[in-house]
Amino acid sequence: MSIHSVKRSQCHLAWDNSIPPVIRIESGETITFDCLDASNGQVTPTSAAASLSTLDIATLDQVNGPVYLEGAFPGDTLMVEVLDIKTAEWGWTAILPGFGLLADEFPEPALKVWDLRDACKADSGQGFAWFDKDKGIKIPVRPFAGEMGVAPGEKGKFSTIPPYKTGGNIDTKHLSKGATLFLPIEVEGALFSIGDGHAAQGDGEVCGTAIETPIQATVRLTVLKDKQYVKTPHFSTRDQPDDSGGYYCTTGVAPAFTNMLFQTALFSALFGLVAGAAQDVWAPPITSPTAASVWPIGSAQNVTWDASHPPSEVTNPIGTLVLSKGGVLDIAHPLASGFPLTAGSIEVQVPTVVPADDYAVVLIGDSGNASPEFKIIL
């Protein structure tokens, strides 16, 4: 039985170190979070694909918390032991127009509601999600929380949509029951939050979603003083029974971008340390716009990036530039596309959007990078 709990209503929509904690606990204590699905309750077991067009994007990917850890200070590490993840009796997977890697292949919205009742009756991490019982189509469930993180040291509101060096939307299927996550602490109290329940997921959300589901997640939170080398999320799966020998993983976060490039280091009882092969990835940093930039709607603006040090082989040398608001990319309406990444600059027309100060431009090609958030005005 968990000592502490966080309710569904105790959630927030940005990583922000000014958000007051909903609870304070001691290091080493256990806490259970009752989390809605990533739609924040907008998708239900009776929803149809047509309802996806009315989703309030601004309320997606909420996280529950934050939790204040006594004795946690910047430079420490938070150890998150995943003790249990229980799903609801249903889940959903959707294709949203203009979102995900399959956007070009599937321009129309699609929604599948899954039956998870068998999984609920089994132990956590067991059972199946049924796609079609009549045809016998099912997949094994492995529940986990797609979002786990602590507050960033930098002031301001940061979207819950992407991952960061302090965690966030890391969407790592290995963080199921028995896994241990390590997060670098940047603020006093750590301010841990969790959410985005998944019943199952492949190696990423290719269509933009996993099997999304409400969850009850039980974790033990412990402050460590001897892991100063943890600068990005690390995790271990040694305690999972289906992983022979288990493994320990490090993650890398590009300096200005919020996508994670996972580089896995496997620890095996038989073979010792096995390092993953290095990848030839180019993420040229954007030099303009900056945090001080102000773009009037309808104006022409020059976006620039440092193209001076490309790798010897660029897998995809053709770039696409998209606008992001609050961490949500407008993939369907690129600012520019089809230009060489080696160009270093391109002129764009500022589209008609809602004026705000949380816009960024994202350069996509061989890899990706994003500018700091800046302001668009009338």
Image (tube, rainbow, N blue to C red):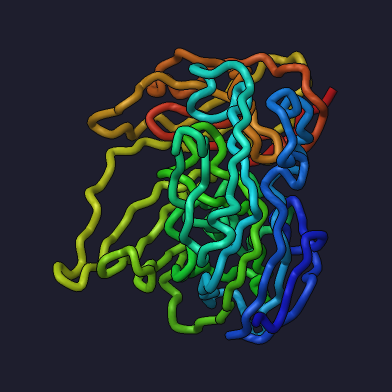
Asked whether residue 292 appears in the rendered view, the answer is no
Q: Is residue 229 above or below residue 154?
A: below
The residue closer to the viewer here, 267 or 325, is 267
Q: Quadrant of residue 220?
A: bottom right
Q: Nearer the viewer, residue 75 or 45?
A: 45
Q: Is residue 19 above or below residue 323?
A: below
Task: Using the image as rendered, state which of residue 216 and residue 280 is in the foreground.
Answer: 216
Which residue is found at the position 58% from the left and 59% from the top?
Answer: 120
Quarter of the figure that contains the C terminus: top right
Q: Residue furthest front?
A: 134
Q: Locate residue 97, reporting x and y percent.
A: 62, 22
Q: Is residue 223 above or below residue 20?
A: below
Q: Is residue 185 visible?
A: yes
Q: How many marks?
A: 0
Say left or right for 21 vs 82.
right
Where's residue 155, x and y in %? 72, 58
Viewport quadrant of the N terminus? bottom right
The x and y percentages for residue 145 are 57, 57
Farthest residue in the right direction?
378
- Residue pictured at 43% horizontal, 44% vertical: 202
Instruction: Name the residue at 38% across, 22% down.
Output: 342
Where does the image place residue 139, in percent across and percent down from the top left? 44, 45
Q: Is residue 110 left or right of residue 4?
A: left
At a point 54% along the width and 45% down the height, the residue shown is 258
